[in-house]
Image (cartoon, rainbow, N blue to C red):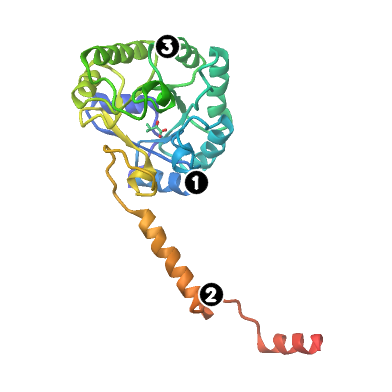
Amino acid sequence: MPVRKKVTTLALREKKTRREIITMLTAYDYPTALALDQSGVDAILVGDSLGMVVLGYENTLPVTMEEMLHHCRAVARGARHALLIGDMPFMSYQVSVEEAVRNAGRFLQQGGMDAVKLEGGRERLETVRAIVAAGIPVMGHLGLTPQSVHALGGFRPQGRNAAAARRLLEDALLLEEAGIFSLVLESVPARLAELISRRLAVPTIGIGAGPGCDGQVLVTHDLLGLFDRFTPRFVKKYADLHAEMQRAFHAFIAEVQSQTFPGPEHSVEMTEDEWQQFLKDTE
Ligand code: KIV
């Protein structure tokens, strides 16, 4: 069996050169990270989607650094091979470049991550340069950037007219120049994502951005059918674990109520001698 090596940012770049498609999925806990790592996925993103699919917030804005680091540590304990990327939460990198570098560093020092991701284009160049200069690999994120949900007027596709598409391409090129190792393109027209992917040397990872990207990412809870509130159009559900959980919970309730669970095989035994001694002692 071939020995699996740790995936690095350089390895993703080499995959693009060899025209091999990159796979990335999100994780927020130890068992999911373990299963993903064993499946052979290239990269695991501890996304701030954590806020919606695990913590039950309306959007990603309330997610804090402490919440992100807590979940990053759990993921880092489960994954040995995949490249681990921590998503910088809202307000952890927007206030000042200094704060951004410090927070990015915490993802590596305290969260066990290999790299960070942050949202935004031309307005983030100084921040990206400073984090990269500190030796921390940065993944960019353009298109539908959920931390700007209010500025964008909702979770809606981006780059759909010529001016917006041109701005997106310019932002992608500027981010590459600033030093990102990869770029997430979310909910943008497929032909625009393909063109950007061809223009960039660094790999693009698409979500709702068509098949022309260098890789694909989904939120694992969407893929598994674990998030009940809504499923974006671009998600493919590979399982319906919400229904499967319901089935298991109903079965447990029914068996407990009918006293078929626990059975003898789930119970702890005591010898008859010890039992008789106990009864005698308690008389
Ligand atoms: O937070 C997240 O899970 C993300 C992915 C959708 C790329 O940013």
Query: Which residue is drawn at the image coordinates 47% and 69% (left, top)?
Result: 252
Q: How many marks?
A: 3
Mark 2 surroundings: few (<14), some (14-19) or many (≥20) residues within 10 A: few
Q: How far apart are the alpha carbons under marks 2 and 3? A: 60 Å
Residue 234, position as x, y percentages in the image: 27, 37
Towards the viewer: 184 or 106: 184
Three-letter residue code for mark 3: Glu
Where disc 2 sits, the SS reads helix
| Ligand 1 found in image quarter | top left
Three-letter residue code for mark 1: Tyr
Q: Which residue is mark 1?
A: 30
Q: Earlier in the sequence, mark 2 or mark 3?
A: 3
Q: Earlier in the sequence, mark 3 or mark 1?
A: 1
Tell me if label 1 and label 2 are in contact, CB under 8 Å. no
Towards the viewer: 126 or 228: 228
Three-letter residue code for mark 2: His
Where disc 1 sits, the SS reads helix
Q: Which residue is mark 3?
A: 123
Please, which residue is most extreme toward the left here?
Answer: 191
Query: Which residue is drawn at the image coordinates 42% and 24% (left, top)?
Result: 150
User: Is residue 248 rendered to the left or right of residue 272?
Assistant: left
Q: Quadrant of residue 59?
A: top left
Above/below status of 280 relative to 139: below
CB of mark 3 near ligand 1 (< 8 Å): no
Q: Which mark is residue 164?
A: none
User: Is residue 137 rendered to the left or right of residue 205?
Assistant: right
Residue 208, position as x, y percentages in the image: 27, 32
Q: Which mark is residue 266?
A: 2
Residue 88, position as x, y percentages in the image: 49, 26
Nearer the camera: disc 2 or disc 3: 3
Query: Which residue is drawn at the image coordinates 75% and 85% (left, top)?
Result: 278
